[in-house]
Image: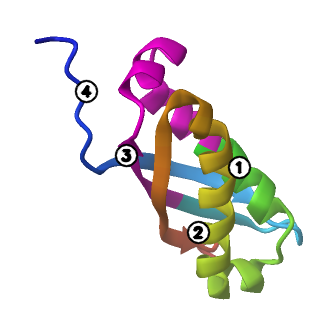
Amino acid sequence: GSDHVDLREHVIDVPPQEVICKDNVVVTVDAVVYYQVIDPVKAVYNVSDFLMAIVKLAQTNLRAIIGEMELDETLSGRDIINARLREELDKITDRWGVKITRVEIQRIDPPKD
């Protein structure tokens, strides 16, 4: 019925956004977040739209994480960003019955010039 919650792993797109590095360079970043619902009851009742919430959280956290890094750190430190973002998101989504399984930065584009 309509109360069915899919427990397989899913992916959410975090659309490109401009983020300012510690050295005041603006980069364009986008990511994908893989998640799994582990507690359907919590997922349904705690957040009316947890997908949108995850996107917003991912964007906010990306700004915070990258804001602490210099441009070259961000370009070479994708794995660090992925890991920190996954950890931050997973802490928050835990109470929604959602596990963040993976986060992947799709691209970090430095300014054109």
Could you give the CA–CA distance between mark 1 and mark 4, rounded to whole angstroms? 27 Å
Is residue 15 shown to the viewer in this render?
no
Query: In the displayed structure, does residue 107 sit left or right of residue 75?
Result: left
Among numbered discs 3 and 1, the one appearing first in the sequence: 3
Residue 81, x across and y down, in percent:
66, 70
The residue tagged 2 is 82
Residue 49, x across and y down, in percent:
45, 20
Among numbered discs 2 and 3, the one appearing first in the sequence: 3
For the residue carrying disc 4, how many other residues have a C-alpha within 10 Å: few (<14), some (14-19), or many (20+)?
Answer: some
The residue tagged 4 is 5
**Under tag 3, what secondary structure?**
strand
Q: Is residue 86 above or below residue 56?
A: below
For the residues bearing labels 1 and 4, Cβ distance under 8 angstroms: no
Amino acid type at mark 1? Asn
The residue tagged 3 is 36
Q: Residue at x 42, y 32 (%)?
A: 39
Could you give the CA–CA distance between mark 2 and mark 4, rounded to whole angstroms? 27 Å
The span picked out in magenta is: 30-57
